[in-house]
Structures are given as structure tokens and as C-alpha cells.
Amino acid sequence: MQGFRSSSAEKIIPNCFTMAAARGFVTSLSVNNYNNSEQKLKMEFCNASSIPDSPFLSSKTRFFSNNLGFKKVISETRSLTLDPRCEVASGAASKSMASSLSALELLKTSAADRYTKETSSIVVVGLNFHTAPIEIREKLSIPEAQWPQVIGELCALNHIEEAAVLSTCNRMEIYVVALSQHRGVKEVTEWMSKISAVPVSDICQHRFLLYNKDATQHLFEVSAGLNSLVVGEGQILSQVKHVVKTGQGVPGFDRKISGLFKHAITVGKRVRTETSISTGSVSVSSAAVELALMKLPESSHATARMLVVGAGKMGKLVIKHLAAKGCTKIVVANRTLDKVAAIQKELKDVEIVYKPLSEILACAAESDVVFTSTASETVLFTKEIVQMLPPVSSEVGGRRLFVDISVPRNVGSCVSDLETAQVYNVDDLKEVVASNKEDRLQKAMDAQVIIEDEVKEFEAWKDSLETVPTIKKLRAYSERIRASELEKCLSKMGDDIPKNQKKAIYDLSVGIVNKLLHGPMQHLRCDGSENRSLSEILENMHALNRIFNLDTEISVLEQKIRAKIEQNQNRSGSLSSNSHKNFGILLKLDKGWGNGA
């Protein structure tokens, strides 16, 4: 019997749970992830035999290991949850219910207040070197220059409010504020498939999904270097900073996502300051140099001819690490001279020879080891090109080494089919970084303490934003009453009221409302001016929602979704009949069809 494994209890949980749920039984399955927080995967069905087959009834849970040996539980549960009102009654009551309400009506009733209770979620849809091979990652990679455009495209989706992209050689992760978790993930996944031509099924096979607190913790670990191929490496923090830099002023890189990434930068800096995690650590570039030296005969380290293609950040680090290992001559092929000249001034003790990219093949013909780190989206070295290069000396092993740390890759994977060449990419660097795993694991455990504190702080700030809709709805509710009563008053007083008296009555009504609202608003303030805990503030918010019946109004989420759908309809001008049907179904789902997302 197949099943999936819980990392904490190491138990096989058979698929019979899923089978039982599909047959109408209520099951609740809990598993623990590596930080001891409990995630519950629930499948609750009422009279499931009467519910038609639906893609919303599937449940899937995946596990992946990070490079520190932890296992994380990624819940991709899509469940249909019916509240106690639709539980199967006994005897005559059951027959009466069955005769008066269809299964469809039960579904609508159970989720009629779906959007009044659901809040927006921070979601990360990602693929990284833990979950996806480079063959998939390179197709999904997004150049930094396109990040602002991507944010706009993602926020144009019906259920995505904010967005950011973190695309590096080891990961492609999309962070969004989703108005609905299930539909948001679905829209982002389909968008990823559309821009990359990777089938949705392949993306779903390799992606990981994290929500809210887990998404926050993941980004903080990424920024701190805990989720890197090389634990503690500093380049990822710089890349997180670039997300904020490129997102500034871009519509869609707004309060929650911007706050998340800015806080992640703070976490990355604090971890590196308060722990020794970055001491003696290596980067992807230095690991590439180490890998090349591991594959070369030791006697050839000082004489091997080195070529570095690309003088960007990664290429510059490769050159520096080669110099630190004793290389005295390095040929650098780059599009322009400027960056190479700057490196020449910095490393005066090393002979750095600049060559334009147009001479790349001639340079490769005279090199034993070729490092590639360009942003080119086309392959620079194909099997046919490498096959024409002259063989290298037996003193360097008889095979020309290509160390490709570019994503997308600059060297075709089929080059390794040649007897005269060997290709290594970023996924092959694990061999280098596995040596000092124990030491890095201890450092990572120290960093986790800091990250947990920072996650609590960010979640408190994010939760405090939940009071904003209540404040807006309470003010709108009070304003409607004030305006209505003012109109009644003025109509009773006649049309010959002087303007100054009308203004006085108006000011009186506004003053009364403001003074009445002052107390409730003070108890919802989250700016630290009042000595109240977050739980107390949220309790006050729920109390006000109940007292003034604010939850019965059209929810903020539903308003946003309707506005986005109308905006997309207007943008497209005219939709096909199928599109109209899809939007109609979507609106019905927004109003009353629940799928537990």
C-alpha cells in the first residue's frame, strides 16, 4: 500500500485515509513539520456520495528535504469542508432535509459567508534546487530586468493583490498576497506555465507551496542563507535586496509583500551579525572553483589554463577565488571591457586578459577549464561547437572541463556525451558543500532561534493589519447612519434654513459620530501607542464586528475580486463566450461555492 511519510514520526500514513474520506467518513490528519508547528490536513465531507466528481476534492501532500537534513511538510490540500449545518441528520429530519435541499444547495449554504470570513494570505509558489532539477528551473527563470513587468502581470490575475519574484540560479519563487489561496495558487501556476511553456503538471510535480507563517519563515531562512546550496553564503541577501530595489514604486509591490521582503533583509543582516554562519562559508562561485580543482589532477592546479565567460557578479567572484587559489593568469570573455578593467585594477597581482565575446570559441580552444556565468538565454557551447575544439593535454586529465553556474545554462548538457569534455552545473556543487555539513548545521540551529523571533514579530505586524477593514467598515456604517439622520432632520426643518445653521447641524452630527467612534477606534489601534496585546486588539475587532453586524456586509475580499474581474473584462474589451462562462462560474464560486481553499 502506497502512502506518504511523516518526517517527525517516520510513519507511513496509508492512502486509506483519503479513500475513507472520499466515501463520506470524516477524517482529520495531523503531521508535524520540522519547526514543531502543527499543520492539519483535513478532509471533511458530508454525504460525499451525492457530491459530483470535482478537481477540488483531491488532496496531495509532498515532502522535501532541505540541505540541513530537515524535512518540511508542504500541504497542498484541496478539501471541501461543510459546516455542522449540513451534517447528516437522523430519522425523519434526515428525510426532510434530503427532500427540501439538493446537494448543490447544501454546498451553497455551507459557504455562503466564505469571503466574509476568509482573509488574504501570503503564499509562495516556488521551485528550487531541493525540489526541481536545473532543466525545469532554467525554463522558469526570470531576468531581473523583467521583475517589475512580472509583478504587473501577476497582480492582473483575479485573485492576486500583491506580488514579488525572487529568481536566482538555485530558485524561482513567486511571493503573492492571494485573495483566495486555492484560486491564487491555480492562477499563478497557470501563469508560470504560460510564460515558460512548461506543462502545469510538471510545475505541480516540482513546486512547493507555503502559506502565511510558513511562507514568512521560508523567506527569512532564504535571506539568512539557511536555504542556500551553500549555507551562509552572502549573495542571496544581495538578491533579496534587489527584489526590494526593483519593486520600489511598482504597483503591486505593496504593503504586505514590501514589508515581508524588507523584514527579510533585516533578518539576513541580524543572522550574519549575531552568528558565525557566514564565517568561512563559500559561495556558489567559490564552490564552482573548488569543484573544478577537485576534478583536475593536483599537479595541474598551477598550470591549468582558465577561461571565465561573463564578468558580472558571479563571474567576478569566480575570478577572485581562482586568484586566491594561486592562478596567475585568467582569460575573461565579456561583452564589454568596463567590468573587466575594474577587476584588473582590483587584482593587480593576477594577469587578467580581456577578450570580447566574439572570440569566445578561440578562447575556449586554448583553455583547459571554462567557467560560464552569463545571462544569455541561448546556449553558448553546444555539442557540435565543443566537438570542433582541439583536445586538452593529458596532464589536466584529457578532458576539457565546463563549469556552468548560469541559469539558464550556457553549456548544453549533451556536451558531456563527448569523450573530450565534461560538464558540471549548479546542481553538481552539492558534492563540494557536503564536506562541512555538521559545522554548518550547528550554526544554522543558532540562526533558527533568531528567525523564530523575527517571524513572530512580522506575523504580529501582519495580523495587526486585519483591523483596518473593520475600522473602514465601522466608519462607513456610522457615516451612513449620520447622513441618513441628518437628511431626515433637515427635511423636517424645511427649506428656508440659513446656510450657517445647516453647517452647524452638519458639524454637530460629525462631532457626535467622531466622539462615539473615538473609544472603539482607540481599542483597535496597533501603532504601539497603547499598551495592548495583539490578541486583545483582535478580540476587540471581532467584538465590534459582532456588535455592529459588520460581517454581514460585502467583504473586502469579495469587493476586490469583483473589481479585478471587472477591470480585466474592461481591459480585454470583449471576451469569448467561454471566457464569459468562466467568469460567471467564478462569480458564483465567489458568492457561495466553497472548496475549502
Image (cartoon, rainbow, N blue to C red):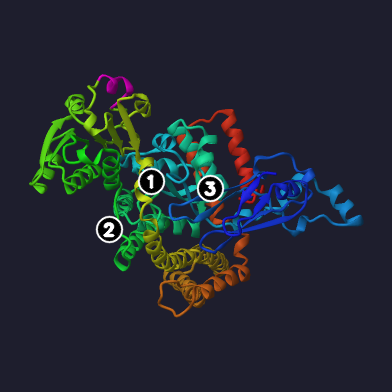
Residue position for label 2 = 280
Verify CB contact (< 8 Å) between mark 3 and mark 2: no
Secondary structure under badge 1? helix
Q: Compared with residue 416, is residue 475 higher up or lower down, i.e. above or below? A: below
The percent coordinates of residue 79 (x first, y second) are 66, 49
How dense is the environment of label 3, judged by Cα within 10 Å: few (below 14), some, or many (20 and up)? many
Horizontal side of residue 221 vs 87, given as left or right: left
Please give the range of residues in magenta. 381-388
**CA distance for labels 1 and 2:** 17 Å
**CA distance for labels 3 and 1:** 44 Å
Label 3 vs label 1, nearer the camera: 1
**CA distance for labels 3 and 2:** 49 Å
Q: Nearer the viewer, residue 542 or 570?
A: 542
Secondary structure under badge 2? loop
Q: Main secondary structure of the magenta part?
A: helix
Residue position for label 1 = 430
Q: Compared with residue 127, is residue 534 higher up or lower down, i.e. above or below? A: below
Tag count in the figure? 3
Horizontal side of residue 113 vs 227, given as left or right: right
The amino acid beneath tag 3 is Ile
The percent coordinates of residue 330 (x first, y second) are 15, 38
Of mark 3 and mark 1, the one earlier in the sequence is 1
Q: Nearer the viewer, residue 173 or 508?
A: 173
Residue position for label 3 = 561
Outermost residue to the right:
92
Q: Compared with residue 384, is residue 123 higher up or lower down, i.e. above or below? A: below
